[in-house]
Amino acid sequence: MRGTGRRIRATGLAAVALAAALTACTAGGGGGGGDGHGTTAARPKACRGGTFTWSGVKQSDRLTGVSASQRLGKGGGALENPLRRVYTPHPSVRTEGPALSPAEVLFSLGKRIGEIDSTAATLADDDSGTTYVFTDVHAKAPALDDGFTRIDGPGDIVAYAGVREVTGTFRYSCRDGASSTGQARNWRVDLAGLVNCGETVGAGIARQAARLSCEDGSAARKGA
């Protein structure tokens, strides 16, 4: 086991996101087939021992859920409004040319962004019996658990959740000159935060949450 992904649960008003890196692993399993959804494409398999070259790798925060605003008095209180989903992240691998295992592609992407140790062997050659969560093309989107149960002060409060999504384009080159190309997507961080509609907010998913749930004319909406 090389760590566990987890969500952060906290009390107190926080306008900044709380994050827990999804660096975890579970023993055995993982990956998928040649079309990015766990099925085997009817085409030749790519060579073993080829080289991945990545380009256009980007990481961006995506809002996945937001609650309606809840007005709390001087003593604060429990947060009761559930989050509604606004975006569903999912791992994806698309390739053209000889078929590649989606798990191998995500393993390479994980190494490229530092999610997986850059000195790790290729997934196909790893005999440790360990599978990184990041390589699982079947991974489900994080549940809309906003990570907060109550706050200690007053305000018109909106809870939100998000992920840090990673996308990139790759080329897989073999020694005989054959190659495969494609795109991959996954997420590596779960995010959660609170917005007080009576206060200005910065950029990012907190601003998006304010736009969706705070009233027109509120300080948070003016800043958004």
Image: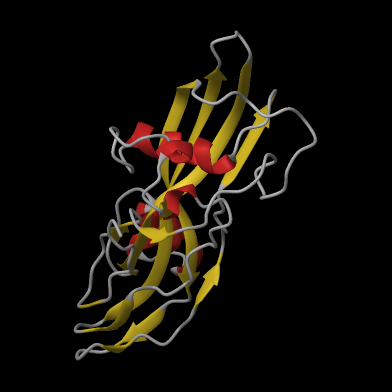
For residue 17, side relative to residue 35 (left or right): left
How far across and down, in percent of the image, does residue 46 sit? Answer: 63, 26
Q: Is residue 17 visible?
A: no
Front residue of 174/212: it is 174
Looking at the picture, the colour scheme in use is: secondary structure
For residue 182, side relative to residue 58 (left or right): right
How far across and down, in percent of the image, does residue 11 sit? Answer: 22, 79
Q: Is residue 158 visible?
A: yes
Q: Is residue 169 above or below residue 154?
A: above
How far across and down, in percent of the image, does residue 103 sit? Answer: 53, 43
For residue 183, side relative to residue 10 (left or right): right
Farthest-out residue, top: 177
Front residue of 29/213: it is 29
Q: Quadrant of residue 112?
A: top left
Quadrant housing the N terminus: bottom left
Count of labels shown?
Answer: 0
Q: Residue at x 56, y 62 (%)?
A: 86
For residue 94, side relative to residue 142 (left or right): right
Q: Residue at x 40, y 61 (%)?
A: 26
Q: Is residue 132 above or below residue 173?
A: below
Farthest-out residue, front: 127
Q: Is residue 180 above or below residue 11?
A: above
Q: Residue at x 72, y 48 (%)?
A: 39
Q: Residue at x 29, y 60 (%)?
A: 20
Front residue of 76/187: it is 187
How far across and down, in percent of the image, does residue 125 sit? Answer: 43, 37
Farthest-out residue, right: 42
